[in-house]
Image: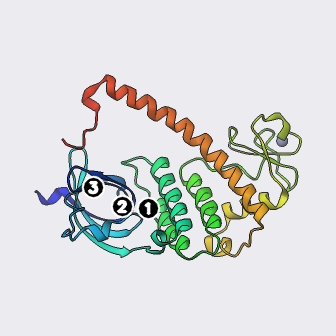
């Protein structure tokens, strides 16, 4: 294997899938190269020295070799095991959600160190936060901003006027909030009370040190989850259709099919 095909990168394991007898295919988010799919050969054998370093959600320093379709993991060292994410079912669920969003909202070949740092920060915060839902909402708003889907929360999506705090509604289709005058014009608008709206804006504009001090009322927590999930579902369903189209295109034109065995 020639030297120039090797590269070193910090990475977090987003997803893993058993492959063949003892291998695993890993979906990684790397700091320097963005999203990468790599094969970890022999990693399911108990004698594997790499296996413990590429557990789900683990942050490691990896040495990878460029491959034709999949890169090959050649060496792995743990930086942060984030063990708490695998020991507590609630935290595990949130970590899956965070990892899935990074996987779904990023493309291979478009690296973003900011996305990596946000992801690493979210995994750190999920290990210790009293309210993991707050970490998730902060993460979602920031990731959407970095991915070009920043929800519009400061001016009405219909008339453009500055929004007050009360009587607004959020429209996933329009990608933001509408003023009380125009909320009823948007068929998919979800009503937002003043405290939920205030928290959304706060999470979108402050850093995590500030945001982590918020103590959410259960009703506000529920409202934030409804709004963010509706918006994400809208974006990802649109994305799913695009992916479905790509898949049918690939089967129509066999030579662009990615085959992990090649
Ligand atoms: Zn308006």
User: Which callout, 2 or 3, points at the residue further toward the start of the chain?
Assistant: 3
Residue 71, above or below 213: above
| Mark linked to residue 47 | none
Q: Is residue 193 above or below residue 159?
A: below
Q: Which mark is residue 24?
A: 3
Q: Quadrant of residue 62?
A: bottom left
Does any portion of residue 187 appear in the rendered image?
A: yes
Q: Which residue is mark 1?
A: 113
Q: Quadrant of the C terminus?
A: top left
Question: Residue 206 or 239: which is nearer the viewer?
Answer: 239
Position of residue 258 in the picture relative to residue 126 (left or right): left
Query: Mark 2–mark 1 contact, CB under 8 Å?
Result: yes
Which residue is label 2 attached to?
Answer: 32
At mark 2, the secondary structure is: loop
**Who comes first in sequence, dot 1 or dot 3?**
3
Q: CA distance from mark 2 to mark 1?
A: 6 Å
**Ligand 1 closer than 8 Å to label 3 CB:** no
Q: Residue at x 55, y 56 (%)?
A: 143
Q: Residues within 10 Å of mark 1 (few under 14, many from 20)?
A: some
Residue in front for this viewpoint, 192 or 113: 192
Q: x, y (%) of residue 126?
A: 55, 70
Locate residue 10, reporting x and y percent. 35, 67
Q: Earlier in the sequence, mark 2 or mark 1?
A: 2
Task: Where is residue 101? Give x, y as percent.
Answer: 51, 52
Classed neighbour count for the residue bearing mark 2: other residues with Cα under 10 Å, few (<14), some (14–19), many (≥20)? some
Residue at 42% x, 46% y: name it.
107
């Amino acid at each position: 294997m020639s030297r120039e095909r090797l590269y070193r990168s910090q990475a977090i394991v987003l997803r893993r899938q058993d492959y063949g007898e003892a291998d695993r295919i890993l979906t990684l988010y790397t700091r320097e190269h963005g999203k990468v799919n790599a094969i970890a050969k022999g990693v399911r054998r108990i004698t594997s020295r790499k296996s413990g370093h590429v557990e789900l959600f683990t942050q490691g320093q990896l040495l990878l070799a460029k491959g034709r379709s999949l890169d090959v993991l050649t060496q792995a060292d743990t930086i942060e095991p984030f063990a708490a994410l695998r020991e507590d079912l609630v935290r595990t669920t949130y970590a899956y959600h965070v990892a899935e969003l990074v996987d779904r909202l990023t493309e291979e070949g478009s690296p973003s160190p900011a996305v990596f740092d946000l992801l690493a920060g979210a995994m750190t915060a999920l290990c210790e936060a009293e309210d993991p839902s707050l970490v998730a909402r902060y993460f979602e708003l920031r990731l959407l901003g970095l991915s070009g889907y920043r929800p519009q929360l400061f001016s009405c999506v219909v008339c453009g006027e500055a929004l007050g705090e009360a009587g607004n509604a959020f429209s996933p289709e329009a990608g933001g909030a509408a003023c009380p005058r125009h909320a009823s014009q948007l068929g998919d608008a979800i009503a937002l009370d003043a405290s939920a709206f205030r928290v959304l804006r706060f999470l979108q504009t402050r850093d995590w040190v500030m945001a982590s001090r918020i103590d959410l009322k259960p009703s506000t927590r529920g409202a934030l989850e409804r709004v963010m999930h509706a918006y994400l579902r809208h974006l990802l369903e649109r994305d799913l259709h695009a992916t479905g189209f790509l898949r049918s295109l690939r089967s129509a034109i066999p030579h662009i099919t990615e085959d992990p065995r090649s």
